[in-house]
């Protein structure tokens, strides 16, 4: 189906600012950012949830405007949730501090003049899905400040809705985002909720302080969407299990994970599609909440990350069993490190500053550097605002080329991959025979 996305499809019905339902105590007025927080621009992590069938929640709403009713429901619960997520209702004071001034989160109510299926079944789904995200915000470097949380509810002609958020990466990572979404959706389902249990724990600079390397005046890790395009790939459970079994036999790796096999395959195919193939490096981001001592709970909010990497200098290095074997070796090494004192992400930022370049740019002399964020086992498909599980969860295009995002495919054991490459490289990538059957 040929389908364009003219701006006339989208009509913004309302724009408002949602403040916390109670004032933030003066003792919490200033939220200190960690070294990793400070290294990131105030780029927005975008995420959207598609709910095809939305039922009215109140008996007296039958004669009211449905979008207004849904927006009011979400705004009320958001206001309650922001009491616990108060930094997201503030604004950046500088690169090291959030002023938790209860300015509020921006909330947009939008009508989309087509059916949801026209978006979800679009041949260029990644492009079409962006229609439900706040315009020009996904992964944008909003370094000068502004709202740290922007929410949009979009209603389709068919009655379905999409709920999307642009969540400041400056304060939290993908796990932080999921915590927020679960808490907000829980309050929406049960408006009588007065206290979130467990309440989010903002770690601030208590884990990665700036004492060792000093504060950063300006961010070092920026997004760059120039010439960047996204492709969605689906790895069904049965085919992925068969591939994992084959790799296990050929590599000697016991029970290779979904993320190990899929990221290795994407790395291999993306490198092959590059005009300057080798040498190449694959950098995996790590959630270190359970890796440090004392362990942090899952409800810890912040950028609690590190990295590990593998490299390929010749064609033998690019064989799938070799890549998976090297990934397993490096992640085991990472788990033995002190992820506070030997945090490879912090060391990369510091080293890049010394060399006068951006992190991951020509890393260790490697021209082609790919990054992978593994969100598998993060239950995004269980985010339920009262209308059941979402039909689809999408991430906006970005934050830069040569980036992979992996997450569970719906509620099963399959994997959905979002691949960002330069548009010229993407045209070669999607023709790779090893990937054709997985491209959505």
Image (spheres, rainbow, N blue to C red):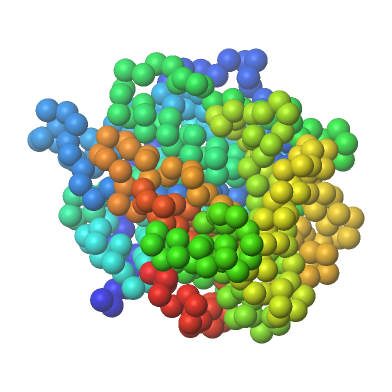
> In the drawing, does residue 73 fall left or right of residue 18?
left
State the residue at coordinates (51%, 62%). Answer: 244
Q: Position of residue 71 (x, y in %)?
A: 30, 37
Q: Position of residue 38 (x, y in %)?
A: 73, 42
State the residue at coordinates (64%, 35%). Answer: 289
Number of numbered discs visible in the structure rendering: 0
Can you say which quadrant of the picture contains the C terminus? bottom left
Can you say which quadrant of the picture contains the N terminus? bottom left
Examine the rendered structure and indicate whether residue 265 appears above or below residue 406. Answer: below
Examine the rendered structure and indicate whether residue 405 appears above or below residue 386. Answer: below
Image-quadrant location for residue 92: top right
Residue 72 seen in render: no
Q: Position of residue 188 (x, y in %)?
A: 33, 29
> In the drawing, does residue 140 fall left or right of residue 194?
right
Camera-nearest residue between 432 and 355: 432
Image-quadrant location for residue 271: bottom right
Q: Position of residue 136 (x, y in %)?
A: 49, 57
Examine the rendered structure and indicate whether residue 59 appears above or below residue 139. Answer: above
* Residue with the most extreme left position: 63
> In the drawing, does residue 366 fall left or right of residue 78?
right
């Amino acid at each position: 189906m040929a389908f364009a996305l003219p701006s006339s499809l989208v009509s913004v019905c309302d724009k408002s600012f949602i403040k916390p339902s109670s004032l933030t105590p003066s003792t919490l007025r200033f939220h200190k950012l960690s070294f990793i927080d400070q290294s990131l621009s105030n780029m927005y992590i975008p995420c959207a949830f598609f709910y095809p069938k939305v039922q009215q929640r109140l008996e007296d709403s039958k004669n009211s405007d449905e979008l207004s009713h849904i927006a009011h429901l979400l705004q009320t619960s958001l206001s309650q949730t922001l009491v616990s997520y108060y930094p997201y209702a503030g604004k950046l004071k500088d690169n090291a501090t959030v002023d938790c001034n209860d300015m509020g989160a921006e909330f947009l109510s939008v009508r989309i003049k087509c059916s949801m299926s026209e978006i979800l079944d679009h041949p260029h789904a990644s492009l079409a899905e962006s229609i439900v995200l706040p315009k020009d915000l996904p992964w944008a470097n909003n370094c000068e400040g502004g709202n740290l949380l922007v929410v949009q509810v979009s209603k389709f002609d068919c009655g379905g809705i999409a709920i999307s958020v642009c969540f400041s990466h400056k304060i939290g990572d993908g796990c932080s985002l999921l915590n927020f979404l679960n808490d907000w959706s829980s309050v929406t389902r049960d408006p009588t909720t007065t206290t979130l249990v467990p309440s989010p724990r903002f770690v601030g600079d208590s884990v990665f302080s700036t004492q060792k390397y000093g504060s950063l005046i300006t961010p070092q890790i920026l997004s760059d969407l120039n010439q960047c395009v996204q492709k969605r790939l689906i790895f069904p459970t049965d085919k992925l299990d068969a591939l994992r079994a084959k790799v296990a036999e050929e590599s000697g790796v016991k029970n290779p994970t979904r993320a190990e096999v899929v990221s290795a395959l994407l790395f291999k195919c993306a490198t092959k599609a590059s005009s300057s193939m080798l040498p190449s490096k694959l950098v995996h981001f790590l959630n270190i909440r359970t890796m440090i001592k004392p362990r942090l709970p899952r409800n810890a909010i912040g950028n609690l990350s590190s990295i590990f990497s593998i490299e390929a200098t010749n064609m033998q290095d690019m064989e799938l069993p070799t890549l998976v074997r090297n990934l397993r070796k490096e992640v085991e090494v990472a788990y033995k490190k002190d992820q506070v004192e030997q945090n490879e992400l912090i060391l990369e930022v510091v080293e890049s500053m010394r060399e006068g370049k951006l992190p991951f740019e020509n890393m260790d002399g490697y021209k082609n550097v790919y990054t992978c964020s593994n969100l598998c086992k993060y239950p995004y498909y269980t985010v339920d605002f009262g209308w059941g599980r979402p039909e689809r969860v999408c991430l906006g295009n970005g934050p830069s080329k040569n980036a992979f995002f992996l997450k569970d495919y719906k509620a099963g054991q399959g994997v959905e991959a979002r691949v960002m490459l330069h548009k010229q490289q993407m045209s070669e990538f999607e023709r790779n025979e090893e990937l054709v059957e997985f491209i959505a």
